[in-house]
């Protein structure tokens, strides 16, 4: 028995009893809490697929201080004359964890699509500081260290357009007229920012659980009005998604004595609970936009990450809807 096998057995002997107790006694709400320290682990990009090949590359900012890791899923079949459609996913490390071999097989047989997982060059599922910097169009008040928080969305759009997109094009032919962008939470806010400021960069935008509360709802003000007034008929499909639990804002399972919880709830109150649905209704009046609003009853903010991504795949490619199924 080699050392690797011994280590795995030792881990299971120690961890399994605790995991069983947690499953028996932890309430569902606790089980769904996001673990900020969660690592990626092994994904289908590591284990491989007969229907997709994966490539990985890293891009850096001009100053070399910021890096992004891109995992690229390329269909194994023949390239269409116009190139493959492409689905771009923010929080790419976490999004990659939601895919498995059966899903890739169905995708290849239904609508072969290039999968662009745009994440950060580390092993974290979610890199909160980096995504706060990149996905927000404006900075909030300085944090305790005196540094402004957020405001890097325009710079990150430049990275997507000028650094990542050319690298993707070098590796696989993509159809410039079939590009979709998905993002969750602050990523959903970024998707709206991309829609508002980069007409034509994508044809389908999927803002899932967008953090419309950011900076007291600033995206519901001037940016929205400027877009509505200046869109000039650019055609796009918008799939807005929200969990019913997010809209209800149930705090019964939250620790209301925790200052961080209270501070977050105060920030979230910067936009009405029905802001996403109302925004969808307003955008539906914009010439050229095809806007759909999907609400997932009973789902909170965390579970909406997977649910919205799986629904987006279903809506865009026609694969079976896995939005109600757990992570493989």
Image: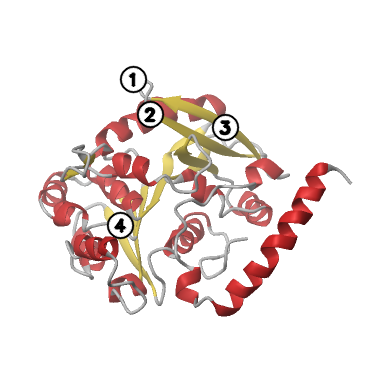
Asked if the residue at tag 2 contacts the one at tag 1, i.e. Cβ–Cβ closer than 8 Å, the answer is yes
* Quadrant containing the C terminus in the rendered view: bottom right
Q: Secondary structure at mark 3?
A: strand
Q: Quadrant of residue 327?
A: bottom right
- Spatial separation of the CA atoms under disc 1 and disc 2: 8 Å
- Spatial separation of the CA atoms under disc 4 and disc 2: 24 Å
Q: Which residue is mark 3?
A: 56
For residue 83, say whether it is visible.
Answer: no
Q: Which residue is mark 2?
A: 66
Residue 49: x and y in percent read 70, 45
Say which label, 3 or 1, has the lower sequence index.
3
Q: Is residue 285 left or right of residue 73?
A: left
| Of labels 4 and 2, the one closer to you | 2
Which disc is residue 13 wearing? Answer: none
Which disc is residue 210 wearing? Answer: 4
- Spatial separation of the CA atoms under disc 3 and disc 1: 22 Å
Q: Which residue is mark 1?
A: 63
């Amino acid at each position: 028995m080699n050392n690797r096998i011994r280590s795995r057995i030792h881990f299971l002997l120690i961890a399994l009893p605790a995991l069983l107790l947690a499953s028996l006694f932890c309430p569902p709400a606790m089980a769904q809490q996001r673990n900020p320290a969660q690592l990626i682990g092994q994904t289908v990009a590591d284990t491989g697929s007969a229907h997709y090949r994966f490539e990985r590359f890293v891009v850096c900012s001009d100053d070399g201080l910021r890096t992004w890791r891109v995992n690229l899923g390329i269909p194994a079949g023949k390239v269409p004359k116009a190139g493959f459609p492409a689905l771009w996913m923010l929080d790419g490390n976490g999004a990659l964890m939601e895919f498995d071999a059966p899903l890739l097989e169905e995708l290849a047989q239904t609508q072969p699509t290039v999968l662009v997982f745009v994440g950060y060059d580390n092993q974290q599922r979610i890199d909160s500081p980096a995504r706060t910097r990149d996905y927000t169009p404006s900075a909030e008040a300085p944090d305790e260290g005196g540094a402004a928080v957020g405001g890097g969305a325009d710079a990150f759009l430049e990275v997507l357009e000028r650094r990542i997109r050319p690298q993707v094009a070098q590796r696989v032919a993509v159809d410039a007229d079939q590009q979709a962008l998905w993002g969750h939470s602050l990523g959903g806010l970024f998707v709206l920012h991309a829609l508002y400021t980069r007409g034509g960069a994508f044809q389908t935008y999927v803002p899932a659980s967008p953090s419309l509360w950011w900076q007291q709802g600033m995206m519901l003000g001037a940016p929205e009005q400027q877009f509505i007034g200046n869109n000039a008929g650019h055609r796009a499909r918008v799939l807005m998604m929200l969990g019913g639990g997010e809209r209800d804002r149930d705090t019964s399972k939250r620790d209301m004595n925790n200052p961080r919880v209270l501070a977050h709830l105060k920030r979230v109150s910067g936009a009405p609970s029905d802001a996403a649905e109302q925004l969808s209704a307003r955008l539906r009046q914009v010439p050229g936009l095809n806007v759909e609003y999907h609400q997932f009853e009973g789902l909170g903010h965390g579970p909406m990450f997977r649910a919205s991504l799986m629904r987006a795949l279903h809506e865009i490619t026609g694969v079976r809807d896995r939005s109600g199924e757990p992570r493989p």
